[in-house]
Amino acid sequence: MLDTIIGKDIELLIYLNNLGSVQWDSFWLFITNKFSAIPLYFLLLYFTYKHYGLKSTLIAIFFVVLLITLSDQTSNLFKYGFKRLRPCHDENISHLIRLVKSSCGGLYAFFSAHAANAMAIAVFFGLLVKNKIKYLPSILIFWALLVAYSRVYIGVHFPLDVITGMLFGTIYAIVCYNLFKLFLKKFIN
């Protein structure tokens, strides 16, 4: 059963990755670059400050740091626990995919920290502002999905890597958001 799932994951990667074209490469490289989202992060902090004030924003920053640390370190635990090679490091399939970046990244792929972190940020801030800014949660989820797909597009992650990453990011975001709300209720309000 596991072999069948992994086989389908490889097939899906090859299909999705080969849909790419040189005309779109720079767009997806921009999306996958972790620094390209910095303006978004500042905007999210501004919205948080505007709707919650300075104290709550500082507490939110603490929980976001906790969230990203959890998400990122869990990804590293899984990568070194499962030791699933990135597609671009797997000699059996590396010749079948387009590696869009000049470098492949670390040796292991499962699961994608990019996908986990982007989804964690999207869900956390989406929950934070859902009653204040109507469409922002949907926009954030769409952004996180783009980041996740970019990892497959550029050839450094399998689809299951990004799906698992998004799942972990979502779970951690919900937990951290609830801890944030509990903290505010207990100590601020």
Image (tube, rainbow, N blue to C red):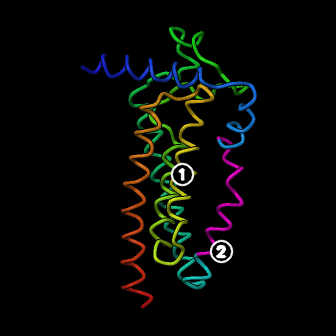
> Of the residues shown, which amino acid type is indicated by label 2?
Tyr
Considering the image in quadrants, where does the C terminus appear?
bottom left
Span colored in magenta = 32-47
Question: Percent x, y for residue 68?
Answer: 51, 55
Q: Which residue is mark 1?
A: 142
The residue lying toward the viewer, choosing from 14 and 41, is 14
Q: Secondary structure at mark 2?
A: helix
Q: Which residue is mark 2?
A: 46
Q: Quadrant of residue 98?
A: top right
Give the residue displayed 36% in from the left and 85% down from the top. Answer: 186
**Residue 68 in magenta stretch:** no
Give the residue displayed 65% in from the left and 41% down from the top. Answer: 32
Question: Percent x, y for residue 16?
Answer: 53, 25
Of the two numbered discs 1 and 2 on the same chain, state the one appearing first in sequence. Answer: 2
Please tell me how crowded label 2 is: few (under 14), some (14-19), or many (20+) other residues with Cα within 10 Å. some
Residue 128 image label: none
Q: Main secondary structure of the magenta part?
A: helix
